[in-house]
Amino acid sequence: MAERKYMIIVGAGKVGWNLARELIDKGHEVTLIENNRDRYLTVEQELEHSVQYGDASELWVLERAGISRADMVIAVTGDDEDNMLICQVAKEKYLVDRIIARVNNPRNRPHFELLGVKPYVSATDLILRVIEHEVPEYGLVHLLDLPEERLEIIELLLGDDSRVAGRRVGDLNMPEGTLLISVLREGQGGFVPGPDTVLEVGDEVLAVLDPRVEEDLKTFFGPDGAGE
């Protein structure tokens, strides 16, 4: 982010505090809002005028923080309802261009989607993705999700029983709406496969696809896939 931005962060927990510090160090103007008095006094010792005390679910607190000129509002409190409300108000009432919300409970993601509060970040989901990447038994890893564009990039590990192992890429009749874009192979690194590339057990294949055919692609590359 080369251009200086004004950002409001709600919630001075470890996430909010560290985020504010990093953004300030990068040259951005930041106001951090915290509604717990003791926590506010602790953070104020370091961030001084960059932190304000108040409940950001109240409009006057947001207005005091200068939300009308904010380039971005980031809600990272420990309460999903507060994060949804704050981001929704920032987006719809104050027309803030960019919002980011923290999701504490992944089961609340549908509510964020329903209210149009996007993008949102779930630490649980991020850790699960790391686990999926580090533990091959999980099979599939989401590398990029763009639901509005109906596009995602996934990584699949070809196991010992994969029906496509040993076959040429050009011979694969992959599900419509999918494209194989890269193969990660031990000893060779990553490369873009051609029609004559033969897939091997242990390959990590990257594919771009329409999310609606994800299960079809997983089945295709898996032990029960048709691979035809």
Image (cartoon, rainbow, N blue to C red):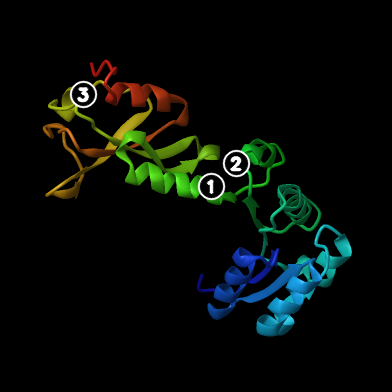
Q: Earlier in the sequence, mark 3 or mark 2?
A: 2
Give the x, y percent position of residue 214: 41, 28
Nearest the eye: 198 or 124: 124
State the separation of the CA atoms marked 2 and 1.
7 Å
Label 1 neighbourhood size at 10 Å, few (<14), some (14-19), many (20+)?
few
Do residues under tags 2 and 1 come within 8 Å of each other at their CB atoms? yes
What kind of residue is marked 1? Thr
What kind of residue is marked 2? Pro
The residue identified by callout 1 is 124
Decide: is 29 above or below 183: below
Which element carries disc 2, helix, strand or loop? helix
Q: Is residue 110 visible?
A: yes
Nearest the eye: 134 or 24: 134
What kind of residue is marked 3? Asp
Label 3 neighbourhood size at 10 Å, few (<14), some (14-19), many (20+)?
few
Which residue is drawn at the image coordinates 75% and 47% (left, top)? 81
The residue identified by callout 3 is 161
Q: Earlier in the sequence, mark 2 or mark 1?
A: 2
State the separation of the CA atoms marked 3 and 1.
30 Å
Label 2 neighbourhood size at 10 Å, few (<14), some (14-19), many (20+)?
some
Do residues under tags 3 and 2 come within 8 Å of each other at their CB atoms? no
Which residue is drawn at the image coordinates 43% and 31% (left, top)? 210
Query: Relative to residue 138, is residue 193 drawn left or right?
Result: left
The circle on residue 106 is 2
Query: Relative to residue 29, is residue 133 drawn left or right?
Result: left
State the separation of the CA atoms marked 3 and 2.
32 Å
Give the x, y percent position of residue 71: 67, 65
The circle on residue 3 is none
Which residue is drawn at the image coordinates 12% and 27% (left, top)? 166
Q: Is residue 139 visible?
A: no
Q: Earlier in the sequence, mark 3 or mark 1?
A: 1
